[in-house]
Structures are given as C-alpha cells and as structure tokens.
Amino acid sequence: MEHPLMVPHDAGTGQNAPVESGSRPSARFAPGLRTQAILYGILAAAILSGLIALGSRGFHWFDATLIGYAVASIFAAAAVTYKYSFWLARPPTGRYWRRSWQLFFSYANFRRYTALIPAAILDLFSQQFIRRRGVYRWVTHQCIFWGVILSCCITFSLTFGWIRMTLTTGGQHLVWFFGFPLFAFSIDSALGFLIYHALDFTAILLFVGLVLALHRRFHDLSLISVQRFGFDLMPLALLMAIVVTGLALTADSTWLRGAYYWYISLTHEAVVVLWLISLPFGKFFHLIERPATVGIELYWRTGEGTEMQKCARCGEEFAPVRFIQDLKKTLLDVGEDYTLREDVLAQQSPESTGTPAEEQATSTLWWQDLCPSCKRVARGQATLAALDPGGNRFL
C-alpha cells in the first residue's frame, strides 16, 4: 500500500512547487523568442512578395487594382508565421512537433507510412473527428472549411497574378499559370462556365455552412451561454459579408450591367482585407494549426508496439514510455513539479535524452507514473488523510 500522502507537491493548495535547482526557465519566457518569431514573419512576407513577383513575371501581369488584397495577404502571411512560430515555441507543441519530425524521418517507421499518412491526411480533410460528434456539426464544418480553402486558393492565385487568362486569335480563352500556358477553353462551354463562376460556387458552399453555423449559435443554449461576440460571432459575420458582397458582384454584372459594381467591389475588398488582417488573431487561426495534428497522429501510431510504461503502484501497462517521458520533460519546461513525496526511482526510458537536469528530474517518481485508476485511489487516500491524521474514523 502506498503512503496516503503520495500525491504531487502542494496538492492540497492546488499549486505546484517550482522545479528545484538545475531546472530550465520556461520556453515561454526565453530571451529573443519574440524577435525570432518577428524575423520569421518578415521572412514569410519577403518570400510571398518574391513569389508574387515571380508568378506575375516581375509584376508585369499584376493587376494594380487588387493591390489592397495583395498587401493584406502579405500582412496576414507575416502575422500567421509570427503567431505560428510562437505557438511552436510553446513547450508542449514544440516538443511534440520536433518528436514528430524525428519519427517521420526514422527509417524504422518508414514501412508503416503507406497506410498511416494517407489515413491521417484523409482524417484532416474529411474531419472525421467532428463527424463522430454529430452529423450536423460535420456538415457545417465541411461547408465552411472547403468554402474558405477553395475561395482562398482561387482568389490568391488571381490576385497575385499566378493565374491569368488571355484571349486567343481563335476566340478561346487561354489559361496561364506562373507565366506558362496551360490550356484553352471556350467561354460558351460547360468548362468555361465552371471556371468563370468557380468563386460563386465556393461562395454558395460557404453560405450554406455559415447559415448552419449561425443557426446553431442562435439556438443551442450550451453555445449561447459561453460564446463571445468578438471571437465566435464576428468571424462568421465577416465571412457572411464576404459571401454576400461577392455574390452581389456577380448579380450586378449579370442583371444590372455593372451599375453598382464599383461600390460593391470596394465594399467587398474592404471586408476581405479586414478578414485577412483578423485571420491570425481570431477563431480561424485553427485552420493553420490543424495540419500539425498529422504529426500527433504519427506520434501516437508509431508508439504502438513500443515499450510501455508500467504503473508505479499496480504494475499495469497504460501508456508508451516515450509519451510519459516527453510529458515529464514538457512539464519541467513550463516549471511544473509533479514529483511525488516519496523519492522512489522510476524506470528510466532508453529513449530519454536531454539535459542532466531533465534526466535527474524525470528519473524520480512522478504523478504521471501512475495509471488513471491508481491516481483516483491516491486522491481518495489523500482526501481521507486530510480529514483526520489517523484516517477516516467513520469507516
């Protein structure tokens, strides 16, 4: 039987004692981290500007009337890279990000990629994790996800001059990509109709998703009680404004002969620019974060069949040793101490590498070395011991 007080330090107060001597400062406060992220953002902006110059053949095919879209896109690329770099610098994401790349380039795992990577990518784009929560939410997210992604791909390619169309001597339209001719089509053909109305189709898809999302947010009491206007509703409102003004451009060109085209286009551009500027700081930043989950899937799948961690109390296997050791080091990075009061040596993983402070701290017995069942037992024992030093006298 373990000691009744075999719980993390200061468990009664809900706080954790700081790591003893030899611990490293938290990565969140590493000097120069913000400067490094800013430099990454500037580099991303420079690369995108170079790609615009390259794709438009030295800005020769760049439409100056779309300068607002281009500037906002460059700013969004810099801000997204800055925030993404900062996000990866956090101890949890940074450690598992590096570990995922180590596993990806591991020759021992190569034979498992044939089935693993396609399944992970399919899950990323089909969002099966949302479908398991409910079909309504899944349809909503799929419409918004593909509506945004496809619209951005088309808009950015046209804005940057990467894709353009010219009229041939035979009366057909020729599609160019990065200055190279691809194919020609007739404007009266079904292909021509699909190409020139591609943004309308993606806007309708996005509109369906937004209607479903807003209906759920206005009728689901569990969402109404916790949602925030600026974070949850404003991004949807901006996307709805983009959809409405975008479809209005087509309607004005088709039925009103462009009578209000200038005003509608200016409003549409202002809304798009506002959405692009808010993208790195709002709800839709998870579109950028989500692809990193492919690495987490790889981390877990390649952990199957490896050495398993045995519970320090009951001896049952409950998680890969690699995961427990990485978790300990991550907690150590953020200054959290979950070592148990009895200094019992735990079995050291052969994969455990790091600084002497990491190895010394993770070689002791941690709260993470207990399986979920034993954690519940330890909490119960600590609660009984807190009621009376001699135990619960009523039992």
Image: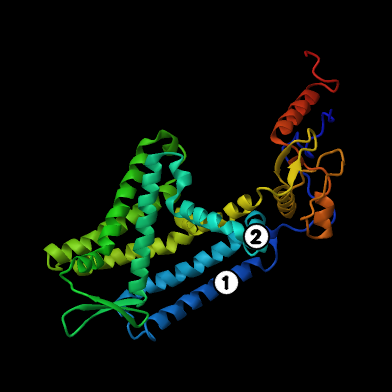
Q: Nearer the viewer, residue 19 or 361?
A: 361
What secondary structure is found at the residue carrying circle 1?
Answer: helix
Which residue reaches farthest front?
111
Residue placed at 78% from the left, 48% from the top? 18
Three-letter amino acid code at the position of disc 2: Leu
Specify few, some or many for label 2: CA neighbours under 10 Å numbering under 14, 14-19, or 20 or more. Answer: some
Q: Quadrant of residue 309?
A: top right
> Which of pointers 1 and 2 indicates the residue nearer the eye?
2
Q: Is residue 67 left or right of residue 345?
A: left
> What residue does disc 2 label?
103
Q: Is residue 126 left or right of residue 390?
A: left
Provide residue 186's location: percent of width, then percent of height.
18, 73
What secondary structure is found at the residue carrying circle 2?
Answer: helix
Please state, as top left, top right, bottom left or bottom right, where the C terminus lies in the image.
top right
Provide residue 330's location: percent of width, then percent of height.
71, 53
Please state, as top left, top right, bottom left or bottom right, where the N terminus lies in the image.
top right
Q: How many circles with numbers are drawn on the protein? A: 2
> What residue does disc 1 label?
40
Three-letter amino acid code at the position of disc 1: Tyr
Q: Label 1 vs label 2: CA separation?
A: 25 Å
Provide residue 246's location: percent of width, then percent of height.
26, 61
Which of marks 2 and 1 precedes in the sequence?
1
| Residue 20 at least partly seen | no
Residue placed at 78% from the left, 39% from the top? 8
Which residue reaches farthest top?
394
When the figure is inspected, residue 159 is found, relative to residue 368, above or below; the finding is below
Q: Is residue 120 left or right of residue 163?
A: right
Provide residue 50's location: percent of width, then percent of height.
46, 81
Q: Nearer the viewer, residue 10 or 160?
A: 160
| Residue 257 at least partly seen | yes
